[in-house]
Amino acid sequence: MAAINDLLRQITDPTLRERLTEEVNRISKNKKFGLVFEEHVPECTPLYGVPVRRGSTVARKTGKMSEIYTVKKIDGEVAVCEDKITLEVELIPLSEIVSVAQFGEPIFPTLEPIDKIANAQDDNLWHTIIEADNYHALQLLEYLYEGKVDCIYIDPPYNTGARDWKYNNDYVDSSDAWRHSKWLSMMKKRLIIAKRVLNPDSSVLICTIDEKEYLHLGCLLEELFPEARIQMVTSVISSQGSTRDGLFSRADEYLFFVFLGDAEVVKSEDDMLNEGQSATKGQLWFQFVRTGKGNLRENSKNLFYPIFIDSSKGKIESIGEPIPLGVPKESITVPEGQLAIWPMTADGREARWRTGVEVARRRVSKGLLRLGKTSRKENGWSVLTVNEGTEKRIEIGEVVIESIDESGAAKLVEKYGGSLRAPKTVWNKTSHNAGWHGSKLLAKILVDRKFPYPKSLYAVQDALSVVSKNKNALILDFFAGSGTTLHAVNLLNSIDGGSRRCILVTNNEVSEDEAKALTKQHLHPGDVEWEKYGIARYVTWPRTICSIKGVDINGNPIQGNYLTNNAPMSEGFAANVEYFKLGFLDKNSVSLGQQFCEILPLLWLKAGAVGERPELNGLELPDMLVLPQNSFAVLLDEDCYGKFAEALNEDKNINTVYFVTNSEEAFREMSDGIGIEHTYQLYRDYIDNFVIGSRRNNL
């Protein structure tokens, strides 16, 4: 129907157009069952930077990308363009048109280096940011990482009716009768490829959404992932809520978790995604700080004392002496290299522990007092204790003990490691507040630069942590927005010593208001002054640099500490990131081996993005590249195979090898001769991937 509407608008006879429109509207009211939506006019992507030549497919920079032309001739600064539908000829200035790639056409991508930050010189791990339309970026990622991604986290446009997302370069708003089917059409094309990059044996797709599209998205996920286990979580992201249209005040959003293979939720001893939950007798571990009536410091003067911990080991070292009422806790000397944990209420008042010093020390010696992680304490730690005494009921999974003493509890702790529980399907955590820990956190970093509705850093961190047991996971976000996912991955790695690698994909769209202001200055998309205000360059990349360096956009230290580990934000992260823009190559030039330098960044990424990306500065290509620091090698001249094989035999750090050869037989013989698992034939693997992939995606 959407395609029919586009055709109706091209009818010049107003009477015929009106009658046909009425008939189409009548037909469209017929009731449909199940997830039935229109496959819309194929998307077209502007290829800024790709020269316009005779025969190029183009569109107006400020028009609809679906209104495309073929360049028949170039006369000076003017292109003679033929409309692909009406066949009408127009003369359009070259400065006003851009080359486009139509959906289903083979594309041959490259990555053009834009910038990088290296804040971990001794670390071989490199994250990646790709500025691109995410559909074509996913086509590239399918070539690089098919079946290798461990987790995808995406926060697509919510399709609320606001003019906050585009289809074919045209904003979709509440007046668009086809906005839901356009949204589904857009999502389906991307999720089909996303499924191919996920590890089918063990991976998770996480997709956030609101009430406007969650039903449609749920049906789409069921259709595309019939073999998966799918669950929806409700997450409170605003204590104030948001009221519109005279309806309930919306305080939450939804997260779909799609589990492939043996992927599962990470269980914990605490209900890590809910706060304010009082302990019950059935729980093995509960807060050592007193709650309820009589819980303040002044209620029991001998129960306010420090517990000294080694945060690097997550261990209680000793119990300090009580301090008299009126003496500030800051006056106590903390042993070097340790932290002091004090009993505090959720709103920051001085409270008291459950037992006196001697009982607490006895519990530590028997393993009945331990540390837990929390976002509610300034230093990120809480103190937990265990049920003891007689007539206490303890449940650990299916094990139930009706009566137990301290010794028995300690044995249970040793045997079962505590009561492990899966997180609940309702998350209610103050650190997930999108205003406090999304917008306000971003304002600390970017100061006066605005980005609408950024996610809470800790909401994303928690979503990743409950499904990411693998500390070496490859994590992808192809609706990256402000870059919260990469920020969260760096925070996770800093907490548990992980080496998770993150790939972000975001376009470089400017906001509608900015577009109007720039247009008044006679600027167009693709112009340098226009592009510098796009999402990727104005928000995502600056946030990434600043969060890693620990400074704001003006170079001042970021104020405050991270909730989850109490680390000062000004410390930044030991992390490396390279920023690329997606470009496109000529197939014939690639086939002739004339664009090896342009493909080299892809080879580095395909081999795992290990070490700083290699570059070739000379005009003449070498016979071979053996790069142990990057874990890959390339043979460009078959005649040098013997020397190449010897070099590989001497260095055992090569995990991926590329052979440039037109002969399938020669490729197999050379691959068999080196005994390395991951080998690829250039440029055949590269070209075939995008030719075959475009056909497969068009089915």
Image: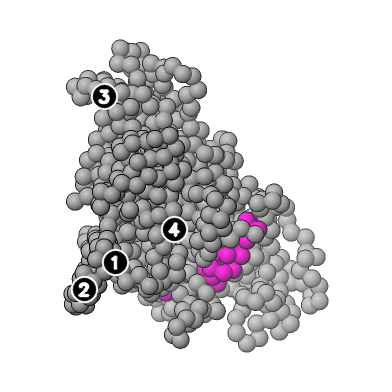
In percent of the image, x 30 and y 16: which residue is there?
638
In percent of the image, x 25 and y 52: which residue is there?
85
Q: Nearer the viewer, residue 396 or 496?
A: 496
Assess whether residue 33 is covered by the magenta stretch.
Answer: no
Provide the residue designation for mark 2.
19
Give the Cα separation between the discs numbered 4 and 2: 53 Å
Whichever of labels 1 and 4 marks the residue nearer the N terminus, that label is: 1
Give the Cα separation between the discs numbered 4 and 3: 38 Å
Give the Cα separation between the discs numbered 1 and 2: 24 Å
Q: Nearer the viewer, residue 412 or 483?
A: 483
Give the Cα separation between the discs numbered 3 and 1: 47 Å
Which element type, helix, strand or loop, lies under badge 1?
helix
Provide the residue designation for mark 3.
671
Residue stretch rendered in magenta on the structure: 424-447
Give the Cα separation between the discs numbered 1 and 4: 29 Å
Whichever of labels 4 and 3 marks the residue nearer the N terminus, that label is: 4
- Residue 481's x, y, as percent? 48, 56
* Disc 3 crowd, CA 10 A, few/some/many (<14, 14-19, 20+): many
Disc 4 marks a residue whose amino acid type is Leu
Which element type, helix, strand or loop, lies under badge 2?
helix
Which element type, helix, strand or loop, lies under badge 3?
helix
Disc 3 marks a residue whose amino acid type is Ser
Question: Residue 327 is drawn in which quadrant?
Answer: bottom right
Query: For the N terminus, which image quadrant?
Result: bottom left
Provide the residue designation for mark 4.
464
Task: Kindly indicate whether the residue at mark 4 contacts the one at mark 1 (C-beta within 8 angstroms).
Answer: no
- Residue 365's x, y, as percent? 58, 63
In percent of the image, x 49 and y 81: which residue is there?
243
* Disc 2 crowd, CA 10 A, few/some/many (<14, 14-19, 20+): few
